[in-house]
Amino acid sequence: ECKGLTAIDELSISVFGSKTIEKAPVDRNNDDDEDDPSSPEAFESAEIIESNRLDALVSGLQISSQLARNSESHYSLLSSVFTAKKLYWMLTETNLTVAAKCCNLIGNLCRHSGKFYDVLSTTICKVEVTDDSSVRGKPQRPSFRHISLLTILAKCCTSPDPATRKFASFAVGNAAFHSSELYGQLGVCMQPLSAALVLPSSGNPPSNGGPDGNNEQNIADEKTRANAAGAVGNLIRNSGLLSGLMAE
C-alpha cells in the first residue's frame, strides 16, 4: 500500500495535488472538433478525467487513513506524500467528501504520537489578487495571506457537511492529545468546538422510522458532539494555557 501511494503521488495527473488537467495541443489543420479544447467533447473529457481523479483521491485517502491508524511506522512516507500544501488544497479546494476524508486522515496521523504536529503547525501562504482596476493607473496586484492548517480545521468543525464536522473534531482532539505543542494555535478551535457541543440534530427529533438521510445525519452529529467533547478535554489535558479562553 505504501509503495502504491508513492506511485499514485508521482502520476502526471497529480491525484494528491492541485495541478489542473492539461489539455492536449490543438491541431489547427485538423477539422475534427474533438481536438478543440473548447468543444463540448473535449470539455466532457476533461470533466470525466477530473471526476476520476477525485474518485482516486478519495480512495487514496481511505487507504492512507488505514495505514496511519494501523501504525505510526508509516508516518514518514505519509508525511512525504501529504504535505501541508496538499492538505490545504484538499480541505479548501476540492469537495466535501474529500475534505471529510482528509480530516479523518489528519486525525489518524495524530493518533499514535505527535510526530505529525510539525506539519499541522505549518502556515500556508495564500496569494490573493486585489482588483484595483477601477482606479485609473492601478492594475490588479497580488496580496499574501498566511493561513494555518489548524485554522482551516477549525472552520471544518462548522462545515455544513456532517461527516466533515465529525472528522474535523476528531482531528483537533488528536492534535491536542499528546502534548501542548499546538495549544498556541488551537485556540481558534475553541469556539467551533463549543458550537459543535450544542449542535442541533438536523433540526429534527431523533428518527423514529423517518428518512434514512436524517437518521444518518443525527448519528453523525452525535459522533461530532462526542468528538468535540473529547477535543475540549484534550485542550486542557497537557497545559492550562487555554483555560482562560475556555472559561470565556
Image (spheres, helix red, strand yellow):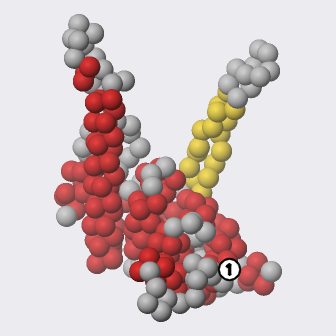
Vertical order, 193 against 95 (above or below): below
Q: Toward the viewer: 178 or 85?
A: 85
Which residue is denoted by mark 1 in the rendering? 194
* Residue 195 visible to the viewer: yes
Q: In which quadrant of the rendered image does the C terminus lie?
A: bottom right
Furthest residue to the top?
29
Left or right: 99 as drawn, with respect to 2:
right
- Label tally: 1
Vertical order, 180 against 77 (above or below): below
Residue depicted at 38% across the width and 37% down the height: 20
Q: Position of residue 6 (x, y in %)?
A: 24, 53
Q: Position of residue 160 (x, y in %)?
A: 56, 66
Residue depicted at 28% across the width and 71% down the height: 67
Left or right: 165 as drawn, with respect to 190:
left
Tell me the amino acid under the disc marked 1. Answer: Ser
Q: Toward the viewer: 223 or 86?
A: 223
Vertical order, 126 against 91 (above or below): above
Q: Tell me the SS state at disc 1.
A: helix
Residue depicted at 60% across the width and 38% down the height: 127
Residue depicted at 27% across the width and 36% down the height: 45
Q: Position of residue 79 (x, y in %)?
A: 37, 60
Q: Toward the viewer: 153 or 243?
A: 153
Vertical order, 227 against 75 (above or below): below
